Image: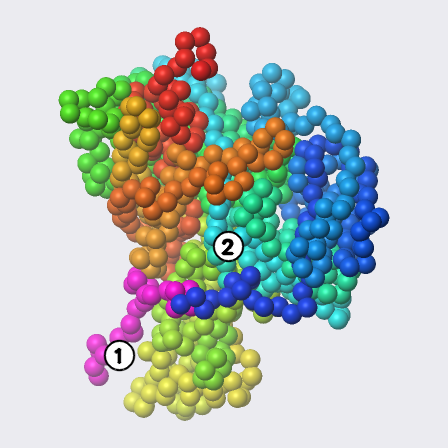
Amino acid sequence: MKQAASKPRRLVGKGMVRVDADGKVRGRTRYLNDIAYKGLLHGVVVRSPVARGIFKALVPDPAFDWSKVVLATAADIPGENVVHMHDRTMPLLAEPGGELRYRGEPIAVVAAKTPELAAEAAARLRIETEELPPLLTLQEAIAVFKKSPKRFDSMKDQDIVKGDLAKGFADADDVLEAEYWAGHQEQLYIENQGFVVFPQKDGSIFCEGSLQCPYFPVHELNDALRLPPEKIRVRQTPVGGAFGGKEEYPTMLVGYAALPALKSGKPVKITYDRHEDILFTPKRHPVWVRFKTGFKKDGTLTAIECDFILDGGAYLTISDVVMFRGILHCALAYRCDNVVIRGRVARTHSFPCGAFRGFGAPQAIWGLESHIDAIAARIGQSPHAYRRRIHARPGDVTPTGQILSTENGSTACLDLALKRSDFARKLQQASRGRLRKGQKKFYGIGLSFFAHGAAFTGDGEAKFKAKGRMELALLDDGNPGVNIRVSSTEMGQGVHTIFTQIAADALSLDPARIRYPMADTGLVPNSGPTVASRTTMVVGNVVHRASQDLKSQMEAFASLRFFRGEKSVLKNSQLTAKGRKPVAFAKVARAMLDELGDVNGFFEFRLPPETRWDQATFKGDSYPGYSWSANVAEIKIDPLTCELAVTRVTAVVDVGRIINPILAAGQVEGGLTQALGYAVMEKIATGKNGLYDASRLQTYIIPTALDVPEYDVKFVEYPYSYAPPGGKGLGELPMDGLAPAIANAVEAAVGKRLRTIPITPEALFEALHPAPGGTP
Ligand code: MOS
């Protein structure tokens, strides 16, 4: 026997070309707005003109011919007027007599044969309101919080308590307290939001559009539309970027489009242009975070006290879980026995904030990693030596009492990042506010170190039990192959490719015989939303196990029907048996399909039985596994214009087993670039009129290719062995730590610590040239 020839080829770990590359590169992939639907109505959302007020009445202009359009209001909602995300407070459309809680809150939907006619009709609706004074920003909410905490309006509170905080402060030689702020951030996916809803004869609806979580609309609109889950079918169209922005919001679009669709019996499509998309879809939550830390002379942390408050906007939607992820990351990466973290979600009269890559963790790590540098400076230690001493490693206990496992590259990430960036030597060259001889720009270098919890928070995965199947079928070319049937969506991150690699390896099948059809809730089991850095780790394991299940079914069948009971193995697309001529996969597959009809491998994800989580006390194993990273940023600042350029970023990353190194590096570079924008450019806030003060690509500035620094990305692999192939979660981690690394580099460059991001040239100018007697 020739061993070498029959050894299965492995795809996991290789840079296989994206399975969606051809269609995307050639422009053949059809996004929602490329699809020519027939007989469509176009929907326009009519919105509150005030940030807060009583909704008195909606008055249609009698001079307009309303028979040409479909007008849907709250009165047309078939069931209860509620969208049940994480609570049941948010109406689908505002009710006359009720309170309008944010500018742009939907009041009605108008649908017509052309978008122009729908827009004209919308403009012919007069909205009568009685305005009330709004509370628009987190700054205003925090002012209330500090002055009279009892009046502070929190939609959700959660504390984490470890050890004895008072004892921790009593043991401290020194105490450092500081506050950190960050503003909104817009996801700015290339493809704007859009959905189309087709009413069906049986009263159900079929919907398709650009989204991350096909099962969300299925389960969040049942009461409003008075339809059970099986009567709301959702299919994904190709997604031109999402980054969290298409996590919870598409449910709203489905709800808005469903109302005129159900009323008229005609399909209704709603798509936003860029202006409407920026103004009226969720952003990253602004944060105020205050750290009060106690430490020994040598820097040993004895106490961490933290207040973490997010601006949730007008309704909770999913902000409770964003805050949970935030507080779980506020003190995660360092050793400390006494910790109190208090999380709150402030209610404001601004657009509800939502999911954006990182989901609370970037806000937490922004504060913590700035603060750790500040402590190092106070005790006279270098930021790298200090982190090397106090960082969490295997065996350490997190603030919720979880013992960190050995599958943990924390030290490896930190050490390799310091080495590759030559950090210690370069830090000596930092300008510290004084140009050296021959220097035209201030130079600085900064470090951050952090972890990201992979998969759902707490017992989320234990309760959810992600399901998936691998379906033996005749493919588009008429020949047998396997369909991957999970609800994970491709949004550019590469899941169609890496699941093909995982399935091909687990089946030992040619990847050309594997397809990944668009997720469709009518056809795929619920493997969960494509969020929370859970896809590779959790659903990747479901694909691996379901593939193994299908493989053994095929082997059993081949043994019986082709090999007279001799044990059979599927290897390199052939069914083999000792002493027999191998039979091609296609032949066995056809025989199986003929005889059995449906053939599926199946798996349901379980957490290890020893996993513990108590939601009431927030104690236990807060995540199944942790990814780790260290970032080093090098920057230059022009002393005259205060322009800041990030010149080089080193990122060493432990996300467990790397399935596709090219896609993984791309994920890291993309996330770092979004974090670069968060740190130094992207500025958007709720203005006095209740609208975001940047609403176009002209005014919302993001990094371009010219702003992207030289990236040095390296992986160290500490796989999650419980769930082969062992990925730990990569999507969000690259977004988490660059902002504080840049702020720390700014401090090294100019000798001043900035505690608010983005650090724009204007902010730097004010910091470096404080006007005598106050703000310039
Ligand atoms: Mo995400 S930010 O968990 O879509």
Where are the magenta residues, as a range? 1-25
Which percent across, then down, holds residue 76?
80, 53
Residue displayed at 53% across by 88% down:
595
Q: Which residue is mark 1?
A: 6
Q: Which residue is mark 2?
A: 191
Instruction: Name the amino acid type tagged 1.
Output: Ser
Residue 459 visible in the snapshot: no
Which percent across, then down, holds residue 159?
55, 31
Q: Secondary structure at mark 2?
A: loop
Return the residue found at the far right. Answer: 62
- Does the magenta segment cover residue 4? yes
Q: How far apart are the two marked residues, 1 and 2, measured between alpha carbons?
A: 45 Å
Q: Quadrant of residue 575?
A: bottom left
590 lies above or below 226: below
Q: Quadrant of residue 505?
A: bottom left
Q: Say which of marks 1 and 2 sits in front.
A: 2
